[in-house]
Image (spheres, rainbow, N blue to C red):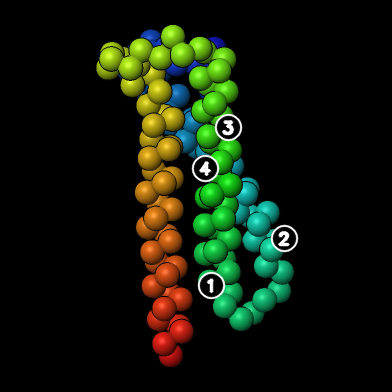
Amino acid sequence: MENIFLDTNYTSFEQSIIKAVIFIAISALLLYLIQFILTKLLFKKSEQRKEINIKLAFLWSMVIYILLFNVYWYFLVFLNGVDAFNWSTPSFYLGILAQILIFVGVVVYFFIKSAALTKIINDKSIN
């Protein structure tokens, strides 16, 4: 496990799972830090609509994280080269399991949280 972040080679299932868990944990920590910074910077002492502002900061942090993740994905492809990506073998997908899980998971979670925020805003605006 020389390089957790920029390696696309599949060595074993156990190392792929360890790599995925470490990558997901670091991604969750980065997402939390971005949300914490946005919450402290953008929404200082607003008591009105505090719940909405916190959820909005979380959505913005997810957008920023997706942008950073796409920059990471660019460097992954750039440093490994397009030839290193053998899309036809199943072992390749196990090698980039963490990246696939993060990308799909964050996008799906963004839409779930966005729909929940829209519902909260609509419920509060009716009353």
Task: From the image, tell me which residue sits under label 4.
Answer: 66
Q: Earlier in the sequence, mark 2 or mark 3?
A: 2
Dot 2 falls on a residue whose secondary structure is: helix
Q: CA distance from mark 4 to mark 2?
A: 20 Å
Residue type for callout 3:
Val
Task: From the image, tell me which residue sits under label 3.
Answer: 71
Residue type for callout 1:
Glu
**x then y, percent, for residue 64:** 58, 47
Q: CA distance from mark 1 to mark 3?
A: 31 Å
Q: Is residue 109 visible?
A: yes
Circle nearer the viewer, 4 or 2: 4
Q: Earlier in the sequence, mark 4 or mark 2?
A: 2
Q: Evaluate if marks 4 and 2 touch, with contact meaning CB atoms under 8 Å apart.
A: no
Q: Earlier in the sequence, mark 1 or mark 4?
A: 1
Residue type for callout 2:
Leu
Q: Does 118 sit above or below residue 114?
A: below
Dot 1 falls on a residue whose secondary structure is: helix
Q: Is residue 59 left or right of residue 35?
A: left
Task: From the image, tell me which residue sits under label 2.
Answer: 41
